[in-house]
Image (spheres, rainbow, N blue to C red):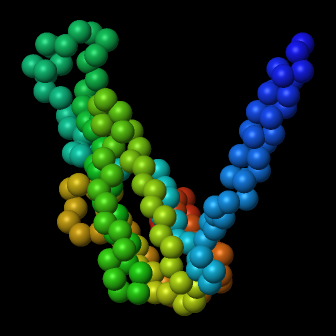
Amino acid sequence: MKPKVVLGQVLLYLLFATVIGVFSRWPSYVALAPNHAIIKLSFSHHGKPVSECRQASAAELASLPPNMRAPIRCPRERSPVKVELDVDGVAAYRHIAMPSGLSKDGASAVYHRLTVPAGTHRIAVRLNDDARRDGFVHVREAAITLEPAQILVIDFDSEKGGITLQ
């Protein structure tokens, strides 16, 4: 190879290494401001069926193929999940999560991240997973003390009694 070609390659490699070195240190990135904490509302939950199961009439059963003649007809569609989060008495998040799936029979997923100053906060979480009921079915209120850089996860687990704060 010619010396000019080798020198050109060396200069380009040095330029490339310099660009990588500069952008690996600048601009500086701070994931979380000092003296702040994070509240994460994150869950996936199946809402209740939109209506009750019903007894199929004899005429309905006769019109169906033999392999589809179940006497009790239950809807597949699930209720949307309505969730509200208040921090210190102020509305922080309001959302209606629609059920997933083509038949709207899957889980509703919710994720929201909120940065708050460290310290004691009054948290109120309300959830309604039943379209047939007004108001909120699950409610959880608590006073939480958050340390700087702490992450509070708000989840919904029906086996643990509903809304959990971890």
Tell me the quadrant of the picture where the N terminus can be found: top right
**Image location (x, y in percent) of residue 88:** 41, 87
Instruction: Identify the residue shown where x is 22% and y is 61%.
Output: 133
- Residue furthest top in the image: 65
- Residue furthest left in the image: 59
Instruction: Identify the residue shown where x is 25% and y is 27%.
Output: 71
- The mark total stands at 0
Tell me the quadrant of the picture where the C terminus can be found: bottom right
Instruction: Identify the residue shown where x is 64% and y is 61%.
Output: 27
Res 57 quadrant in image: top left
**Image location (x, y in percent) of residue 148:** 65, 81
Q: Is residue 91 visible?
A: yes
Q: Is residue 137 visible?
A: no
**Image location (x, y in percent) of residue 37:** 58, 77
Q: Nearer the viewer, residue 4 or 153?
A: 4
- Residue furthest bottom in the image: 120
Instruction: Identify the residue shown where x is 49% and y is 87%.
Output: 121
Res 141 quadrant in image: bottom left
When the figure is inspected, residue 6 is found, relative to residue 154, above or below; the finding is above
